[in-house]
Image (cartoon, rainbow, N blue to C red):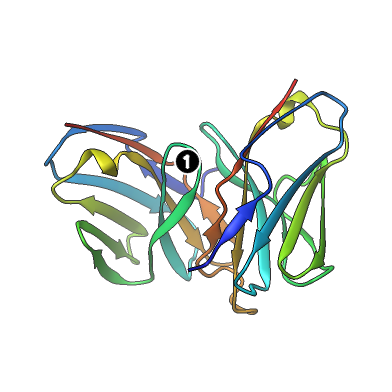
């Protein structure tokens, strides 16, 4: 079975802190994604990566950056957390380069609260 | 603008009832996905389909490409089916609906 894990289920941070959310997948997938999920808005794509050291902006990249130094690991970074970044963050991955938007496998999510 | 619309937003059913959740989309797609999210967050993929109908246990998903519409049916619903069901479409990118929150009462 594909397994996508995220470093924390719940996280509480203060405004202005630098926050790291880590995602690891064990199926050698090329593509990895970071989403945030807010009530009434559904999932929105923050960034995705189709290869090591490659990244592409999604729909809402402002205030975020990402890092993919190894194929299995994709990190989301909030350089200076703000209260409007309080949300559920979901990582996903899929395989088959060239079929970027094939079925995705999701991690359990990190509920981040910024005070 | 919402590329994917789901209805209803919320649904409460008695155990054993037949349930239908609808999804309409406005973009060209290569596939439509039905996802399930239980309380706590994790999302699992139920179906990926590009035509016709798929069945898995008590769940049935259909798609009408011409009408840009899909339905997810649950037969003989059970309290463990309580979850948020999300419709998503994939083409040039992924678009997600806002989900249907289903509660099945014993």
Work out whether A85 lies above or below A48: above
Q: In terms of depth relative to the viewer, which is nearer, B38 or B2?
A: B38
Total count of labels: 1
Q: Position of residue A44 (x, y in %)?
A: 62, 46
Please, what secondary structure does the residue beneath circle 1 have? loop
**Relative to the observer, which residue lies in front, B1 or B35?**
B35
Image point (82%, 31%), residue name: A81
Q: Is residue A78 left or right of residue A110?
A: right
Q: Residue furthest top?
A: A115
Q: Quadrant of residue A73?
A: bottom right
- Left of A111 or right of it: where is B52? left
Q: Nearer the viewer, residue B15 or A24?
A: A24
The image quadrant of residue A86 is: top right
Identity of the residue drawn at 50% across and 47% down: B42
In the depicted structure, whether residue A15 falls above or below residue B42: above
Pinpoint residue B58: horizontal percent, then vertical percent. 19, 56
Q: Horizontal placement of B11 versus A33: left or right?
A: left
Disc 1 crowd, CA 10 A, few/some/many (<14, 14-19, 20+): many
Q: The C terminus of chain A appears in which quarter of the rendering?
A: top right
Query: Which residue is at a point 53% across and 61% down the rendered structure image?
Result: A105
Return the x and y of residue B5 as percentages of the image width and height.
42, 45
Q: Which residue is mark 1?
A: B98
């Amino acid at each position: 079975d594909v397994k996508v894990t995220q470093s924390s289920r719940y996280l509480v941070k203060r405004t202005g802190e630098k926050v790291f959310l880590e995602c690891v997948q064990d199926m050698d997938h090329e593509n990895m994604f970071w989403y945030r999920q807010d009530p009434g808005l559904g999932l929105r794509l923050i960034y995705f990566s189709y290869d090591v050291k490659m990244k592409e902006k999604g729909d809402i990249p402002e205030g975020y950056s990402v890092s993919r130094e190894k194929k299995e690991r994709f990190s989301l970074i909030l350089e200076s957390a703000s209260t409007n970044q309080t949300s559920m963050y979901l990582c996903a991955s899929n395989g088959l380069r060239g079929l970027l938007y094939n079925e995705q496998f999701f991690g359990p999510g990190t509920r981040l609260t910024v005070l | 603008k919402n590329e994917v619309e789901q209805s209803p937003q919320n649904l409460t059913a008695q155990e054993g009832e037949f349930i239908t959740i609808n999804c309409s989309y406005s973009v060209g797609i290569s596939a439509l996905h039905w996802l399930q999210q239980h309380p706590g967050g994790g999302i699992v993929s139920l179906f990926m389909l590009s035509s016709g109908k798929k069945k898995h246990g008590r769940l049935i998903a259909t798609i009408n490409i011409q009408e840009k519409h899909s339905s997810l049916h649950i037969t003989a619903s059970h309290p463990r089916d309580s979850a948020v069901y999300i419709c998503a479409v994939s083409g040039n990118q992924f678009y997600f609906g806002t989900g249907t929150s289903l509660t099945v009462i014993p």
